[in-house]
Amino acid sequence: MNEKTMTMDNVLADLIRISQVTGSDPDLVQGGGGNTSVKTADGVYMYIKASGTSLKDMSAQKGWRRLRVDKVLAVVRDDSLEALDVAEREAQVVGRLLGACDDDRPGGVRPSIEAHLHALLGQTYVVHLHPRVISAYVNARDGRAVLEKLFADEHDPILWVDYEDPGFLCGRKMAQVVEHYHATHHRDPSIIFLEKHGLFTASDNADDILRLVRYVVDRCEGHLPTFEPSREISPCPGEIDQVTEAIAAALRGVTGQSYLICYSCPATIRALMERSDAPDLLDTGSLAPQEVTYANGPALWIEEATAAAIENKMRARMGKGYKHALAFVVKDVGLFTAGSERTVATAQATAEMSIFARMCAAAFGGVNSLTTEQEDFVIRFEAPADPGAVKG
């Protein structure tokens, strides 16, 4: 084994370790999402998580691709792409990122669609996550101001990136702000918050990147309000079954599909149900692309838990251009989420995270959700046609 091969093996081992550590903490990832990358010492190659892979499941045999950094950067710096129709542009980006791969992995396994965001940062290790506590800030109207004050004592200032549609345009936006940051501070940022999206951290040391992730999350968590429900919710099994049947019937009426329905009522949901502003907190757009993709938007607030009433509420939302709901908060009962055996747990986790973030955002100037145009972009180009339907 030559020195170059040994170096590549070492950085791949680092990538696997970082991915498994971060991906095993459900408070750091959403639906197994997020991505990680490691560059070789010469800066020629970058190993990055493969699309569709959970971080915790990465191994030496699967879950990653190796790319030429110069080819990845050429994509985000190609001015001609900006003039293309969105669908054509994003298809070209996906194809060119796949073409930038230089390894022996199966040809159909794509690198993360956010590979260009990782390549833009000069540090060796880059970790992009959607931590539960970070969602409270990046989805709040005053989130940026609160974070800049919270991290005001940092030697290297944090970087905030205003929201941009996922894909190529997000890469272009990040390229501009990172370039400006570098020109101002003579280094690349190590802590980056993306509005309505998540957290990027970067470091030249594998152990330091893990410490940095934990440091940022812990510091943000210490500044959040707490939500302690005053009482337990103990609906009788018959009531849960009755609501489950009503939601299933409403979904069949709207979609013609059958869904697996799951019930939960953790402290976050109980705290929401005790708030007078609960309906208003849920009656906004989605907080982030992940909520559109995994849960078809925010949970519906339900006071009359009959099939007809639930179906009417779903159709009213769909009449405004949104997809049918997959999560429902039924007053004095709890949270019900719909999906397939494969997707329902992710829909539930997404709904619970969103509700937590919305309650926190109320203390930080209010909820800053996706606009109708932003959500429409995600629906058309990111979200599956009907996540969670049980076929057959």
Image (cartoon, rainbow, N blue to C red):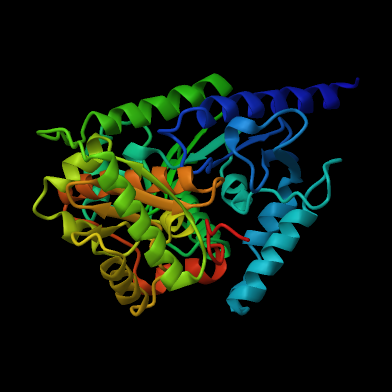
Q: Residue at x 24, y 53 (%)?
A: 330
Spot occupied by residue 23 in the image (x, y as percentages of width and height) = 53, 32
Spot occupied by residue 365 in the image (x, y as percentages of width and height) = 16, 53
Q: Is residue 60 visible?
A: yes
Decide: is 358 above or below 387. above
User: Observer-nearest residue: 349 or 14?
Assistant: 349
Decide: is 117 above or below 1. below
Residue 243 in the figure: left or right of residue 199: left
Label count reads: 0
Spot occupied by residue 110 in the image (x, y as percentages of width and height) = 72, 51
Q: Residue at x 25, y 47 (%)?
A: 239
Residue 241 in the figure: left or right of residue 87: left
Residue farthest to the front, as pictured: 238
Decide: is 228 above or below 238. above
User: Observer-nearest residue: 192 or 372?
Assistant: 372
Query: Dividing the image into 4 quarters, which one contains the N terminus?
Result: top right
In terms of image quadrants, where is residue 265?
A: top left
Q: Is residue 137 visible?
A: no
Query: Dividing the image into 4 quarters, which one contains the C terminus?
Result: bottom right
Q: Residue at x 17, y 36 (%)?
A: 227
Spot occupied by residue 17 in the image (x, y as percentages of width and height) = 62, 23
User: Observer-nearest residue: 183 or 5?
Assistant: 5
User: Observer-nearest residue: 298 or 325?
Assistant: 325
